[in-house]
Image (spheres, grey):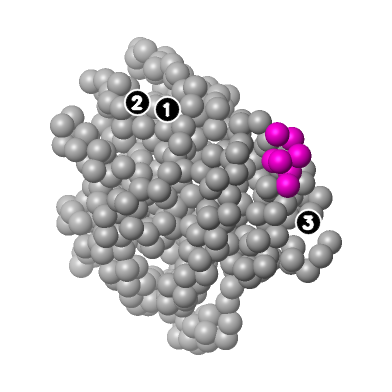
Amino acid sequence: MGDHTMMPEWPQYDDDEAKALLEVLNSGNWGSTSGDVVATFEREFAAYQQAGFGICLSNGTLAIAAALRAAGVGIGDEVIVPPYTFIATASAALFVGAVPVFADVDLDTHLLDPVAVEAAITERTKAVIVVHLAGRPADLDAFTALGRRHGLTIIEDAAQAHGAAYKGRPVGAIGDLGTFSFQSSKNITAGEGGAVLTDNDELAGALYSLVNVGRVPGGGWYQHEAVGYNLRLTEFQAAILRVQLRRHPAVQEVRERNARLLTDLLRDVDGIHLAPEDPAITAHGRHLFLLRLPDHREAVLQSLATAGFTRASSGYVPLHRNAAVLRESKAITEKLGQPYPDADCPNADTVSAETIWLPQTYLLGTEDQTRAITTTITSAVNETN
């Protein structure tokens, strides 16, 4: 294995994170009910994404569940989701008793198709979860318009899209609600954690209550005005996140530079499909770099592994074929006497069979390392053309 395969490790940190952790440790205020570090990070992260309100919580999965609950989604309601996403996008709907309904993705972008969503709407549909997969913003103009037309809540699943922007505005509060993850692999991380953003003060109040066991801001300790979870982040996590947020712009520049180089070197290779450029995407989150290789995926994965690039992945298995999700969904619809909406998602089947992911650590290397990745991919494709 040559030096070119020794890609940067993740997470990246230094003494600033250590000092921030020690400050919380020595303060004795380890929980957000007694400290102010979580509240400070909530304000900073909301400002970073140009949202009116930010509410932190334990992880990105429950961020989606809380967003759905805050929007009034409940038992028997339908939530339209893409099948090419992490399981949390669908399982969060199940957590609140709702049924995830799968609409197909676009073959070129891997993102939820607004036309397929519109076709999947029924009288039971209450929300659409739009995933900014890999950090690429979805067509938010189309989805916000669709939400207005049909009276649906639009939730942005931005777990992979920190710093991403659509038409000059950071994602997260362009829809009604936006959810983020700070899990270990994410571009801003505290090991675990999540956030929900919104511009709507009523939704923000509902989220605060859901995170804080039904309490209300300024209310008494045992004043529970609603039934809420307990999803609070610790002050330790927020201390790390504040430093990670300050670090993000500089690290993101490296990701963007390497992603541009990958795109330039791979765009015209016969047999490789990259998502088309879109002027509406004014900042890409660059959490993953996706390539679709209809005839070459296994050969390229093997070549990457042989060359030492072992973290390249074949990505998601489509959720509309996940037995656990189907079983839970049908249990709800059968109990309520509702029809189960069978999914027809051929594009999701195609992209799941043809896509390769390069993780964000592969976007943090040197120019030489990036060129070594493209040489490995291109050689494998050319050998099997």
Q: Are marks 1 and 2 in contact (CB under 8 Å)?
A: yes
SS at circle 1: loop
Residue of label 3: 308
Q: CA distance from mark 1 to mark 2?
A: 6 Å
Q: Position of residue 24 (x, y in %)?
A: 47, 81
SS at circle 3: loop
Q: Which residues are magenta?
A: 379-385
Q: Amino acid at mark 3?
A: Gly
Q: Amino acid at mark 1?
A: Asp
The first of marks 2 and 3 along the sequence is: 2
Front: mark 3 or 1: 3
Q: Position of residue 244 (x, y in %)?
A: 48, 73
Residue of label 2: 116
Q: Are marks 3 and 1 in contact (CB under 8 Å)?
A: no
- At a point 81% along the width and 65% down the height, the residue shown is 2
Rate crowding at label 1 as few (under 14), some (14 to 19) or many (20 or more) other CA atoms within 10 Å.
many
The image shows residue 185, relative to residue 306, as above or below, that is below
Q: CA distance from mark 3 to mark 1?
A: 34 Å
The image shows residue 70, relative to residue 119, as above or below, that is below
- At a point 46% along the width and 43% down the height, the residue shown is 275
- At a point 31% along the width and 32% down the height, the residue shown is 114
